[in-house]
Image: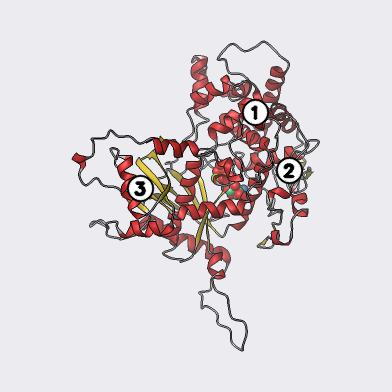
Amino acid sequence: RLAAARLLSGAGPVAADVGREEQPLRGAETGSEDKTPKKRFSEVQEERREQAQRTVLIHCPHKVSEKKFLKYLSQHGAINNHFFYESLGLFAVVEFARKESVGSLQSGTLMPHEAAIPFRSRFLSLKLKNAGGQPSEPPSVRASQQLPPSSQRLLERLCRAESVGDQLDTLLQELQLTEENVRLRYLTCSLIEDVAAAYFPDCTVRPFGSSVNTFGKLGCDLDMFLDLDEIGKRSTPKTVGNFLLEFQVKNVPSERIATQKILSVIGECLDHFGPGCVGVQKILNARCPLVRFSHQASGFQCDLTANNRIALKSSELLYLYGALDSRVRALVFSVRCWARAHSLTSSIPGAWITNFSLTMMVIFFLQRRSPPILPTLESLKALASAEDKCVIEGNNCTFVRDLNKIQPSRNTEPLELLLKEFFEYFGNFAFNKNSINIRQGREQNKPDSSPLHIQNPFETSLNISRNVSQSQLQKFVDLARESAWLLQQDGEGGPAPAPRQPWGLAALLLPSVRDSRSLSKKQNRRPASERVKSLLESIKEHNPDSPTATDGK
Ligand code: CTP
Ligand code: MG
């Protein structure tokens, strides 16, 4: 148990992926920069991927003895790291030091007699051979938490903070993905890759979106894409001489049809043979075709796409922005949480703003500060070297990938001010005529009449918020104005809030005048504490087992 506790306490937050240890809470206030070299996105992805390949997932009985379990597994080689978590049962994630150990473990694993379809995956079940002999040691495993804290706990922690800036940092620390959760996300992709490899040997399944861009909140969905590009790169065609050999392949009318066909068979495969994959839905007619399913053992709602390198590139860009200044993530988490609390975002697809759009808005706002806190995408492109060049499907996706080549900002504005100014800025933004464009870092004329126009950074003819209705945008504007006003009141040193009374960021997450207008009379008669509780309950992430739930899509 002690060993496990030590391992767990050694695990920092996902921010460690950019080569920094957990920031002391106050460190994020003004983006004070440290000098530790920061890791590139591709380095993190490769390290995590390799780590996941040395890892297995084991469903365990609750009365397992951790010590004996580890001793039993280490017959196959040294164990680097492990942790337990509760999902539908108790699960262990075990990372071996060497990949061969996984092969050795699989060789010593029994294929159950009832297995109509034998599949040697890395998702195993531990059985106690001699159940009577085990309980001498009481159940001792410590389960690591994979879901966000309760809204009650979050509210209490926010109220105990020292300043609004401190509250923003607290929110980030409470909601960001933990080290274990990141491991579990990469492992899940790696397990799905094993299934897809049955059809496409040497394929890669890569996570993207908020699981890897450092803006993910515990409980967010797991976006992944099937990358078949590597298959073509495995051979080095001999070009000398008079002959050239080419693989025979089946031709399909278009790339879109190919993607749909590939996802269709992978969807079938996951549905029929994928251990722990349930509720598989093929959504092949969407602009970006996908297969949606629940990975029961990890509890993740997964969206699998194919041929989606641009989305991976935008995840890399967000990762870079998140790593450039420590205020960025704190601000994005608070804005996302605020939007969720007021039902501006939803787990059901519709006319709502998405988390991705909100992140773009925060980045744009930080580019507009004076001096700017974040560089424009154009200036990141100007810093790029030849090896950074990247063109995907005719779209220029080039930008500098080495974070250490980017000068830190001279801006020292505190988080509290930035949050207030964010609300003021977008409370007064000319959405009717201007588009948000992080490439140029300034407003552009809107190319069409959609209420909210946020240019896709790489596919520049696309609007990432095309789905947003005028009324949802208006709701955003009204709430932003009200929140700016509330923060202004705080700043003017109004009467100090009573102890335990929500203040600062906590107050912004409560029902606004606007929200309460739409509450039914019955709800209004409930005591304030109850209303506060139920509203904060809505901050909690959706139930990941629900097949239709994906945040903001
Ligand atoms: N994406 C995009 N254009 C959109 C929507 C999504 O390019 N209109 C890409 C982005 O790279 C985004 C990823 O798809 O990060 C995943 O989308 P989504 O799951 O909606 O957003 P996340 O960033 O993962 O945020 P969340 O935590 O809400 O899942
Ligand atoms: Mg997502």
Query: Which label number is shown at residue 550?
Result: none
Query: Which label number is shown at residue 436?
Result: 2
Residue type at numbered disc 2 = Ile
Where on the picture, by quarter, is residue 210?
top right
Looking at the image, tell me whether mark 3 or mark 2 is earlier in sequence order: 3
Q: Relative to residue 79, is residue 175 drawn left or right?
A: right
Mark 2 nearby-residue class (10 Å; few <14, some 14–19, many ≥20): many
Image location of residue 179, percent across then percent down: 51, 41
* Helix, strand or loop under label 3: strand
Looking at the image, tell me whether mark 3 or mark 1 is earlier in sequence order: 1
Name the residue carrying label 1: 26
- What is the distance, in whole Å, between disc 3 and disc 2 at their CAs? 46 Å
Looking at the image, tell me whether mark 2 or mark 1 is earlier in sequence order: 1
- What is the distance, in whole Å, between disc 2 and disc 1 at their CAs? 31 Å
Q: Under 8 Å from ligand 1: the CB of mark 2?
A: no
- Quick check: marks 3 and 2 in contact, CB under 8 Å? no
Residue at 54 percent of width and 45 percent of height = 211
In the displayed structure, 72 sits above or below 527; it is: below
Of badges 2 and 1, nearer the viewer stands 1
The N terminus - image quarter:
top left
Of badges 3 and 1, nearer the viewer stands 1
Image location of residue 542, percent across then percent down: 48, 36
Quadrant for ligand 2? top right
* Helix, strand or loop under label 1: helix
Q: Who is closer to the viewer here, 509 or 287? A: 509
* Helix, strand or loop under label 2: loop
In the displayed structure, 307 sits above or below 530; it is: below
